Image: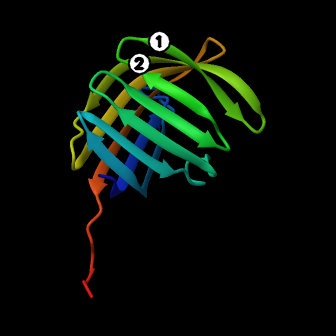
């Protein structure tokens, strides 16, 4: 069953470097959990620099897939200890990017949960930064709703 949720995203670009860049934001989205797999989606905003893009995340026991569709299009597959490359498509041009997933942790269930991914990002085979993001998904409370 699809649920309305609050999604809190905390990301660190340049993880473990002196010039770490932190980004935190909260948005509403949708979530469902079935057969051990959690799926969530939300609209990006100007805060993330990806306005006009919908992000969907599929959290499986051994990997996390992040799809972006809209102004930015990409499909990132995070699997601990593996390297994957993907095409990052923008209105300004495309780039082949790669991710080397260092660690994945998640505690997703039918009520939401957390996903944490630590990875190294590279563009055209040159390392750009070590990044880490944590996403927390919480079911939206039905505040002040009345029947009738």
**Residue at image location 44% in from the left, 36% down from the top:** 12
Q: Depth check: 68 or 96 in front?
A: 68
Above-or-below relation of 100 to 55: above
Q: Position of residue 91 (x, y in %)?
A: 76, 39
Q: Position of residue 35 (x, y in %)?
A: 23, 34
Q: Which mark is residue 147?
A: none
Task: Please tell me which residue is depicted at 26% across the width and 25% down the height of the picture.
Answer: 61
Identify the residue shown where x is 61% and y is 20%: 97
With 124 as the anchor, is 45 left or right in this view?
Answer: left
Residue 58 vs residue 92: left or right?
A: left
Q: Which residue is label 2 attached to?
A: 101
Q: CA distance from mark 1 to mark 2?
A: 6 Å
Q: Residue furthest right?
A: 92
Residue 89 left/right relative to 18: right
N-terminal label among 1 and 2: 1
**Residue at the spot of label 1:** 83
Q: Is residue 76 above or below residue 127?
A: below
């Amino acid at each position: 069953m699809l649920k309305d949720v609050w999604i809190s995203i905390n990301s660190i670009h340049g993880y473990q470097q002196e010039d770490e860049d932190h980004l935190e934001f909260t948005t509403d989205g949708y979530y469902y959990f079935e057969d051990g797999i959690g799926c969530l989606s939300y609209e990006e905003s100007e805060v993330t620099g990806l306005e006009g893009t919908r992000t969907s995340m599929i959290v499986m026991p051994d990997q996390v897939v992040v799809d972006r569709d809209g102004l930015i299009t990409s499909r990132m597959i995070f699997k601990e200890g593996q390297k994957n490359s993907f095409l990052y498509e923008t209105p300004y041009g495309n780039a082949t990017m790669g991710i080397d997933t260092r660690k994945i942790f998640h505690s997703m269930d039918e009520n939401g949960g957390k996903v944490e991914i630590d990875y190294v990002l590279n563009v055209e085979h040159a390392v750009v930064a070590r990044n880490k993001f944590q996403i927390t998904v919480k079911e939206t409370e039905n505040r002040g709703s009345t029947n009738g």
